[in-house]
Amino acid sequence: MYPIPLPFVLAQADLTDLKDMFSLALGVIFFFGFVYGIFLVWRGARKISDGDSEGYSSIFGGIIISAAGLIMSAFFVLAGIGDAVITPTF
């Protein structure tokens, strides 16, 4: 069996299909990032209650990770390239 060349496979896909695939992959990545960010916030709060000063950085990191999609979209819109934003889907 001969493998199918990659450019031939990509040439068969429409641009809307490719955008839909990226949108789905982005949705899955943001979902796991949001869950991980919430876990970091919870862990940071737990560290603070135990008296550890590293809890604040964990909370800050969790907020940044959880809101990464919103932050990136806002930067794209502020830069004037709001059409480049892909809406994540599930």
Image: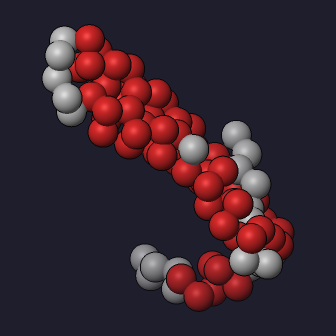
Residue 10 position by quadrant: bottom right
Q: Measured from the top left, where is residue 90 in percent x and y?
A: 70, 40
Residue situated in front as seen by the camera: 87 or 63? 63
Residue 45, visible in the rendered structure: yes
Q: In this image, 62 relative to 69: left or right?
A: left
Residue 87 position by quadrant: bottom right
Residue 73 to residue 56: above or below: below
Residue 49 to residue 77: above or below: above
User: In which quadrant will I find the N terminus?
Assistant: bottom left
Q: Residue at x 57, y 44 (%)?
A: 67
Q: Residue at x 40, y 39 (%)?
A: 60
Q: Residue at x 77, y 77 (%)?
A: 81
Q: In this image, 80 relative to 69: left or right?
A: right
Q: Residue at x 34, y 19 (%)?
A: 45
Give the color scheme: rainbow, by chain, secondary structure or one colour.
Answer: secondary structure
Residue 46 to residue 80: above or below: above
